[in-house]
Image (cartoon, grey):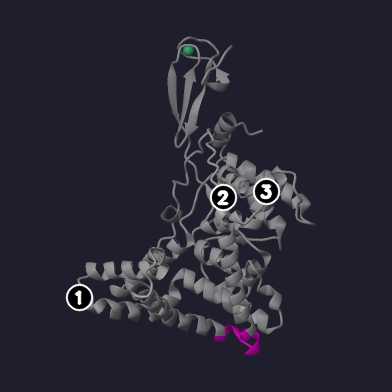
């Protein structure tokens, strides 16, 4: 063959013109399109069904993958794990067995990374580019599912299907064409650093009071739970004040206020009550009642985060103050929001250990298997098993389309 052609190898014999010029035109979704470079005869082949696993990697893992691709420094003591996990993950993604979704928590952390554009590109390509609904929206989704049940005096019907919180069908074949959108978010880096600094500062004050009061697991769990209602009410009152405050003529403040999680929740709850024919004047009463109800303790993101903070408090009270570091709040958010929907989470060692402690191990229910650097071999074994279970037909097509060795 000479010159340019849209079709690419591997080439096979064309059934129409009998030349060895039948190549791949495109692949993705559920179809492989082959076309003859000589006579343009086209065939569409349905690709085998997939059953991909959603594996959520924390930012540490993505930074490590980045370091491998760019010849950077690998985490000390974990060099061979880094190389092995990189190769296995890549293979599992290309074999269409796994994808590595990314969330707003990654995006915030990526923005403060030294090469944010490249890192973002990495999880879009390396991981199969599935983006998850923002963590705040997942929380709202769960809050609303529980509110419906509360207003109807019914059992909450909560689905943890990944499709509810992701933008694409999990079981589609990856496109063979990669389109690189190099969005630059670095302008937000200072703001994100500042917010993270404030959150960390507040968290350290809380930790000090845990230590001072010799907090116990049960106390902190109870106070976390009983703070949900008053805290929501306070946030709503603050919102109300900011919007009504005649002093503030700043339209940016109004814009920010209209997007605040508490207002979005309130608005959704009003809509639910309206659908149920509840008089408008009764909405605030019903909503505050729901916020203070025991139902709140069963909402997955509330329950998981309350248990995790109680477990952290227990460690702090034992003198382990180092457990409260800059990454803690994001780690708790990641676990409490995404663990119910993912097949696996690879997270910081500290939180992984807490999840294995009682009463967390028994009381918390979520789909994800939890992995961390505390047992790297366990994660490698999990990936090897997935790799080994790839159906032959899927393997053959993946090798043809993406060129897996
Ligand atoms: Zn042909």
Figure check: 67 above or below 146: above
Q: x, y percentage for residue 401? A: 56, 30
Let me know if residue 166 is in the magenta part.
no
Label 2, secondary structure: give it.
loop
Please give the range of residues in magenta: 209-219
Mark 3 vs 2, N-terminal side: 3
Q: x, y percentage for residue 380? A: 68, 52
| Residue 57 visible somewhere in the drawing | no
Q: x, y percentage for residue 174? A: 51, 38
Q: Which residue is mark 2?
A: 100
Badges 1 and 3: C-beta atoms under 8 Å apart? no
Seen from the viewer's position, the closer of residues 10 and 292 is 292
For mark 2, does the 10 Å Cα neighbourhood hold few (<14), some (14 to 19), or many (20 or more) residues?
Answer: many
Q: Which quadrant holds residue 196?
A: bottom right
Check residue 65 in the rendering and tell me which mark sits there, or answer none.
3
Report the Cα–Cα distance between label 2 and label 1: 46 Å
Q: Which quadrant holds residue 156?
A: bottom left
Mark 1 vs 3, N-terminal side: 3
For mark 3, does the 10 Å Cα neighbourhood hold few (<14), some (14 to 19), or many (20 or more) residues?
Answer: many
Seen from the viewer's position, the closer of residues 152 and 337 is 337
Q: Which residue is mark 1?
A: 279
Seen from the viewer's position, the closer of residues 261 and 254 is 254
Q: Residue at x 23, y 67 (%)?
A: 275
Q: Tag count in the figure?
A: 3
Figure check: 156 above or below 342: below
Magenta region, main secondary structure: helix
Q: Residue at x 39, y 69 (%)?
A: 143
Quadrant of the snapshot with the N terminus:
top right
Label 1, secondary structure: give it.
loop
Quadrant of the snapshot with the C terminus:
top right
């Amino acid at each position: 063959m000479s010159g340019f052609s849209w079709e690419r190898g591997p080439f096979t014999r064309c059934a129409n013109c009998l030349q060895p010029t039948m190549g791949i035109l495109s692949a993705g979704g559920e179809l492989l399109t082959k076309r003859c470079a000589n006579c343009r005869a086209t065939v569409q082949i349905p690709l085998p069904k997939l059953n991909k696993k959603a594996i959520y990697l924390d930012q540490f893992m993505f930074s490590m993958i980045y370091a491998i691709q760019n010849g950077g420094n690998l985490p000390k003591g974990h060099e061979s794990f880094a190389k092995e996990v990189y190769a296995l993950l890549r293979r599992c993604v290309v074999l269409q067995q796994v994808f590595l979704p990314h969330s707003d928590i990654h995006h915030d952390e990526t923005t403060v990374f030294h090469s944010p554009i490249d890192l973002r590109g990495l999880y879009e390509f390396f991981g199969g580019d599935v983006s998850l609904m923002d963590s705040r929206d997942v929380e709202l989704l769960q809050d609303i599912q529980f509110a419906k049940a509360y207003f109807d005096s019914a059992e909450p019907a909560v689905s943890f299907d990944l499709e509810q919180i992701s933008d694409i069908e999990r079981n589609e074949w990856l496109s063979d064409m990669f389109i690189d959108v190099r969005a630059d978010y670095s302008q937000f880096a200072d703001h994100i650093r500042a917010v993270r600094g404030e959150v960390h500062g507040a968290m350290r004050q809380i930790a000090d009071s845990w230590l001072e009061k010799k907090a116990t697991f049960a106390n902190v769990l109870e106070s976390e739970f009983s703070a949900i209602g008053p805290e929501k009410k306070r946030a709503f009152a603050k919102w109300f004040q900011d919007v009504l405050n005649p002093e503030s003529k700043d339209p940016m403040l109004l814009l920010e206020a209209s997007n605040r999680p508490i207002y979005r929740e309130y608005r959704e709850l009003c809509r639910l009550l309206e659908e149920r024919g509840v008089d408008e004047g009764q909405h605030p009463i019903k909503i505050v009642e729901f916020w203070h109800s025991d139902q709140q303790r069963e909402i997955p993101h509330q329950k998981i985060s309350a248990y995790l903070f109680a477990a952290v408090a227990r460690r702090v009270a034992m003198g382990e103050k180092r457990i409260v570091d800059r990454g803690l709040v994001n780690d708790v958010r990641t676990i409490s929001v995404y663990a119910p929907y993912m097949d696996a989470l690879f997270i910081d060692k500290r939180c992984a250990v807490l999840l294995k402690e009682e009463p967390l191990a028994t009381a918390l229910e979520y789909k994800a298997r939890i992995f961390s650097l505390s047992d790297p071999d366990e994660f490698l074994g999990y990936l090897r098993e997935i790799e080994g279970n790839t159906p032959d037909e899927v393997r053959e097509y993946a090798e043809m389309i993406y060129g897996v060795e």
